[in-house]
């Protein structure tokens, strides 16, 4: 990655050299413009990078002349995060239609129109934070495999997710939701539920092919029943302080990696019910006393890579 935090850090000659590097390394070289505190980023700068394939214009307050994005004929990866941007038609840029990866960070209005993504036939990875205008257009993406959604309010329907046939990995972070019903997908292999406000129920039966499940910072969740997940290989549950039961651990015959920490789950009971398939185990206890009692037990299991981590 090459990063530029202010306009004094680059000139035309320097950018020509960067452009040559872009030609050589392709999307393996990410060029990032960020910061520019006290000034605005001028997208006319991009005229000197016609061969850039991976570009970040993010962590910026202001940017002007965004229309110069159209001159980037080879762009494959793009991240956009300009807080005061007033460019709702950003995704209509012809340069973005060949993207494989797209990241949209929040703006002050969160008004970027997502409808043009219907023509993004090559898009494989998408992260959207806060923008919901025509969000249902995501369902039309034929190659989308990895989707991350952040800052989406609980009243916004996400039921279109089940229509994304190619989807394999989903992350839902921040925002609000009472349950995961809108996220249901029968082909999903990886699911992350992170810091979702108000979430009190996770029905994993809605994701029958799940192989990896991560649940973090869910303070209203009392129980997690993993029995429907017959293909589950990795489970991580962290900072769910009201959680008292993880049901189905003893029958999880495919489980290879288990991480549980900062919950009210009785860790000694987890060890009593640990399936033979587990090869890696990480536990975070709430106190030094618990650590003293369980550390030797974990070591005695003889699991390759298994270890016990105490309170922190």
Image (tube, grey):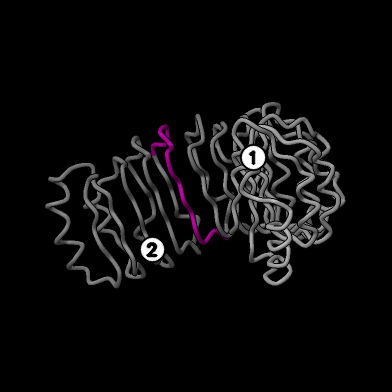
Q: Which residue is mark 2?
A: 257
Residue 275 higher or lower than 285, as above or below = below
- In this view, the residue in front, 126 or 276, is 126
Q: Would residue 233 appear left or right of 97 to someone viewing this image?
A: left
Which numbered dot is residue 105?
A: 1
Q: Rounded to the nearest whole Å, what is the CA distance between mark 1 and mark 2? A: 32 Å
Q: Residues within 10 Å of mark 1 (few under 14, many from 20)?
A: some
Q: Residues within 10 Å of mark 2 (few under 14, many from 20)?
A: some
Residue 220 placement: quadrant = top left
Q: Residue at x 69, y 29 (%)?
A: 84
Picture coordinates of residue 51 (x, y %)? 78, 62
Picture coordinates of residue 276 (x, y %)? 32, 70
Q: Residue at x 74, y 50 (%)?
A: 163
- In this view, the residue in front, 183 or 118, is 118
Which numbered dot is residue 207?
A: none
Q: Residue at x 24, y 52 (%)?
A: 269
User: Which numbered disc flags the more N-terminal residue, 1 or 2?
Assistant: 1
Let me know if residue 104 is in the magenta part: no
Residue 54 placement: quadrant = bottom right
Main structural element of the magenta stretch: helix, strand or loop?
loop
Q: Could you tell me which secondary element the residue under label 1 belongs to?
A: loop
Let me know if residue 218 is in the magenta part: yes
Q: Would residue 270 appear left or right of 222 to someone viewing this image?
A: left
């Amino acid at each position: 990655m090459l990063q530029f935090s202010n306009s004094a850090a680059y000139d035309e000659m320097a950018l020509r050299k960067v452009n040559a590097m872009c030609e050589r390394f392709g999307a393996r070289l990410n060029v990032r413009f960020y910061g520019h505190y006290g000034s605005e980023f001028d997208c006319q700068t991009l005229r000197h990078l016609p061969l850039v394939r991976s570009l970040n214009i993010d962590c910026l307050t202001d940017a002007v002349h965004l229309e110069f994005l159209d001159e980037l004929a080879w762009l494959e990866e793009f991240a956009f995060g300009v807080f005061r941007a007033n460019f709702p038609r950003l995704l209509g840029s012809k340069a973005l239609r060949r993207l494989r990866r797209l990241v949209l960070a929040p703006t002050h209005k969160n008004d970027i129109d997502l409808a043009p993504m219907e023509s993004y036939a090559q898009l494989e990875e998408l992260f959207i934070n806060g923008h919901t205008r025509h969000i249902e257009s995501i369902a039309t993406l034929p190659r989308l495999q990895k989707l991350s959604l952040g800052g989406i309010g609980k009243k916004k329907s996400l039921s279109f997710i089940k229509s994304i046939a190619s989807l394999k990995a989903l992350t839902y972070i921040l925002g609000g939701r009472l349950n995961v019903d809108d996220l249901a997908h029968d082909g999903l292999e990886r699911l992350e539920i992170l810091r979702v406000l108000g979430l009190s129920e996770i029905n994993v039966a809605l994701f029958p092919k799940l192989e990896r499940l991560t649940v973090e910072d869910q303070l209203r969740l009392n129980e997690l029943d993993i029995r429907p997940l017959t293909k589950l290989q990795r489970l991580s549950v962290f900072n769910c302080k009201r959680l008292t039961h993880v049901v189905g651990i003893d029958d999880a015959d495919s489980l290879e990696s288990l991480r549980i920490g900062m919950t009210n789950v009785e860790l000694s009971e987890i060890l009593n019910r640990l399936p033979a398939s587990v090869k890696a185990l990480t536990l975070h206890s709430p106190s030094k006393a618990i650590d003293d009692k369980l550390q030797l037990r974990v070591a005695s299991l003889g699991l390759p890579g298994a270890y016990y981590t105490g309170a922190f």
